[in-house]
Image (tube, rainbow, N blue to C red):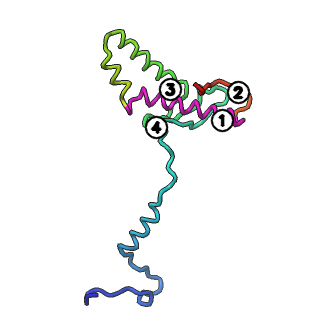
Amino acid sequence: MSANHTEIQAQNIPDGAQAPVTYRNEQEENSAAAEPVSVKPERAGWIEKIDKTDLDKSQINVAGFGVVTLGQLKENVSKKIEDLAKRINNNEPVFVWKRIKEKYGFLMHGIKALVEVERDIEKLRRAGKMPGMLKRYNFNS
């Protein structure tokens, strides 16, 4: 060590004082905090609040777009598909192709969210957490 630096030892620190944190200690603390946490696969949508009497009123969080009801999500996706069908009839196939191929566009993201939420609802129904609900969803196809 050079003459300008002194080694900090436990006996050199007065009572009640905190030892200065060295770069090594900060690295050790950060590496301990940065341990890998179980990572969930990326989901497009999940149930925020479920309404067991009317599923279309259940609140769904669509990643990147916000919270909507299940009915609003279904209506929005169906309007997007109807618009694409009209554009096919108007000879705009390139526009339709681009909208379908968009990785982060609402059409495919909304459909993925809808499928994930419907599967979650079916899992709840099969687990017996939604008594009295008739079988409504078929994901075997």
SS for dot 1: helix
SS for dot 2: loop
Q: What residue type is labelled 3?
A: Leu
Instruction: State if disc 2 and disc 1 touch (CB < 8 Å).
Output: no
Residue hosting label 3 = 73
Numbered circle sitting on residue 133: 2
User: Residue at (59%, 36%) from the top-left corner?
Assistant: 49
Q: What residue type is labelled 1?
A: Leu
The part of the chain drawn in magenta is 103-129
Instruction: State if disc 2 and disc 3 touch (CB < 8 Å).
Output: no
Q: Which of marks 1 and 3 is nearer the N terminus?
A: 3
SS for dot 4: loop
Labels 1, 3: front one: 1
CA gap, disc 4 to disc 2? 27 Å
User: Residue at (28%, 87%) from the top-left corner?
Assistant: 1
Q: Which amino acid does label 4 sit on?
A: Ala
Q: Is residue 48 above or below residue 17?
A: above
Residue hosting label 1 = 124
Query: What secondary structure is the magenta-colored segment mainly?
Result: helix
User: Residue at (39%, 75%) from the top-left corner?
Assistant: 21
Q: Residues within 10 Å of mark 3 (few under 14, many from 20)?
A: many
